[in-house]
Amino acid sequence: MAKTKTKKEKIVDLKPKAEKITDEQLKEVQDAVNEINRAQMEIGMMETKKHAALHHISISQEAIGKIRTTFEKEYGTADVDIQTGVINYPTENGEVNS
């Protein structure tokens, strides 16, 4: 038996397509985007503060390194109690150097 060809029907959409979203939907998406932008700006400011703090720590660590070198030259050790200023001299054979 031979196959018969059927015509494909063309469907016409009579409902017009929307050109814009509603004002309420627009405000909702704008608010969401603004919240994201605000959060990203805050993160950027925090990262800038973090960078400055890390830089400050680095400078302080360099200063401590110089102080340690000075103590080692002057006292033979950099082991100092930072609360009292007491120098902790290394022990040799269980006796403290004087």
Image (tube, grey):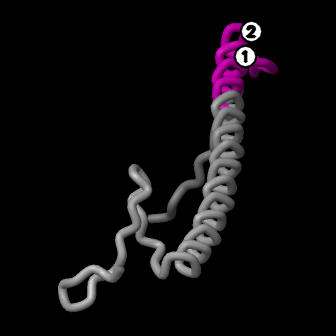
Q: Would residue 79 appear left or right of 32 to someone viewing this image? A: left
Secondary structure beneath dot 2 equals: helix
The amino acid type, in three-letter code, at marker 1 is Leu
Highlighted range, magenta: 13-36
Residue density around tag 1, few if under 14, some if 14–19, many if 20 or more, within 10 Å: few
Q: Would residue 80 appear left or right of 6 to someone viewing this image? A: left
The amino acid type, in three-letter code, at marker 2 is Asp
Q: Would residue 54 appear left or right of 92 to someone viewing this image? A: right
Q: Position of residue 2 (x, y in %)?
A: 50, 64
Using the image as rendered, state which of residue 30 and residue 88 is in the foreground: 88
Which residue is tagged 2? 23
| C-alpha distance separating marks 2 and 1 | 5 Å
Q: Position of residue 71 (x, y in %)?
A: 55, 72
Establish if 28 lies above or below 88. above
Using the image as rendered, state which of residue 81 and residue 17 is in the foreground: 81
The C terminus - image quarter = bottom left
Which residue is tagged 1? 26
Mark 2 in CB contact with mark 1 (< 8 angstroms): yes
Query: In terms of image quadrants, where is residue 69?
Result: bottom right
Residue at the spot 71% in from the left edge and 31% down from the top edge = 37
Residue at the spot 72% in from the left edge and 11% down from the top edge = 22
Residue at the spot 35% in from the left edge and 70% down from the top edge = 88
Q: Position of residue 27 (x, y in %)?
A: 71, 13
Q: Position of residue 75 (x, y in %)?
A: 50, 76
Determine the residue located farthest toward the left in the rendered image: 94
Establish if 93 lies above or below 85. below
Residue density around tag 2, few if under 14, some if 14–19, many if 20 or more, within 10 Å: few
Using the image as rendered, state which of residue 15 and residue 11 is in the foreground: 15
